[in-house]
Amino acid sequence: MVTVIFPAAGVGRRMGAGRNKALLELCGKPVLVRTLLRFSECDKVDDFIVAVGAEEVDAVVQMLSKVQGIKPFRVVAGGAERQYSVRNALEALSPDAEIVLVHDAARPLVTVKTIEAVVAEAWRSGAAIAAVRAKNTIKVVRGDGVVESTPERSKLWEVQTPQGFRRDILEEAYRRAASEEYLGTDDAALVERLGLSVRVVEGDDRNIKLTTPEDLWTAEMFLGRDALGVAKERVASAGADLGEMLGDLACKVSDAADAVTAKVREYKEKREGTK
Ligand code: CTP
Ligand code: MG
């Protein structure tokens, strides 16, 4: 079984909306709902565990219960750091979970293709992360603002989620991090500390993490473009259907005209015969 953990217990300080950004509306639906619906489209994952603020648990259960087409889910209270939110969710895993994916609730634009690629690589090698090649040159800068070094860009990848792991590997990584009081910025970093290989699968540039208000506008634009694409396809296929219907109709009219002509001829012949 494949379970997806969604850390969604942040306060969204950089978004500046004064509330958890996972609960903000994006094109008419809360970000968290959009994220869970995307994963619900993927038949390679089975169920969800969502970590939200302790005081948000009841409201989120209510909200998600009303959404059609969402996979089975549980909601748990998160912690003061993302890593603690994931840890709390790990404690709620069912015994059947074999692969665990972790995905930021704040990435609603993830594609089913990326999810499938991470799940497949996690089954194959035990640890997989979605990432995209760095587009910009990245510098290591000292605290006093002076550049220390320039890592070779071709080796740099920007890491996203989902990140997927064999359950035992992720649990061991979290146990180790807790005992060593290590706080990482992603889940793979904890697994890397076990000395295990983590494989990169190519993600998607659109899979942005909604962090500042500008990211919301970008996401709205992507969703708007997708909706326009779907609308165009519908019009095109309705046009094709219409063409077929008109073709059928023309055949029927032509058959009917032939039948009428034949009847008229028959009638004329009969009349001439009786003369
Ligand atoms: N997250 C979490 N628990 C925390 C902090 C973050 O579950 N204590 C989640 C967020 O809800 C988000 C994801 O981790 O879905 C990525 O974190 P980030 O983008 O940093 O979100 P916030 O912490 O909410 O934002 P900010 O850092 O600007 O306050
Ligand atoms: Mg944060």
Image (cartoon, rainbow, N blue to C red):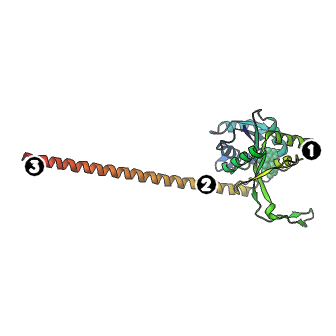
Q: Earlier in the sequence, mark 1 or mark 2?
A: 1
Q: Residue furthest front?
A: 124
Q: Which mark is residue 181?
A: 1
Badge 2 local density, few (<14 within 10 Å), some, or many (20+)? few
Disc 3 marks which amino acid? Answer: Glu
CA distance separating discs 3 and 1: 109 Å
* Foreground residue among 232 and 270: 270
Task: Report x, y in % for residue 131.
Answer: 76, 54
Disc 2 marks which amino acid? Answer: Asp
Q: Are marks 1 and 2 in contact (CB under 8 Å)?
A: no
The label nearer to you, 1 versus 2, is 1
Q: Is residue 246 left or right of residue 58?
A: left
SS under mark 1: loop
* Foreground residue among 124 and 153: 124
Q: Residue at left 28%, top 48%?
A: 256
Q: Earlier in the sequence, mark 3 or mark 1?
A: 1
Task: Report x, y in % for residue 167.
Answer: 79, 39
Task: Report x, y in % for residue 158.
Answer: 78, 57
Disc 1 marks which amino acid? Answer: Glu
Residue located beneath label 3 in the image: 272
Q: Are marks 3 and 1 in contact (CB under 8 Å)?
A: no
Q: Is residue 266 left or right of residue 213?
A: left
Which quadrant holds residue 151?
bottom right
Residue located beneath label 2 in the image: 226
The label nearer to you, 2 versus 3, is 3
Q: Is residue 137 left or right of residue 113?
A: right
Specify whether tag 3 is near ligand 1 (CB below 8 Å).
no
CA distance separating discs 1 and 2: 43 Å
Note whether 153 is above or below 262 in the view shown. Answer: below
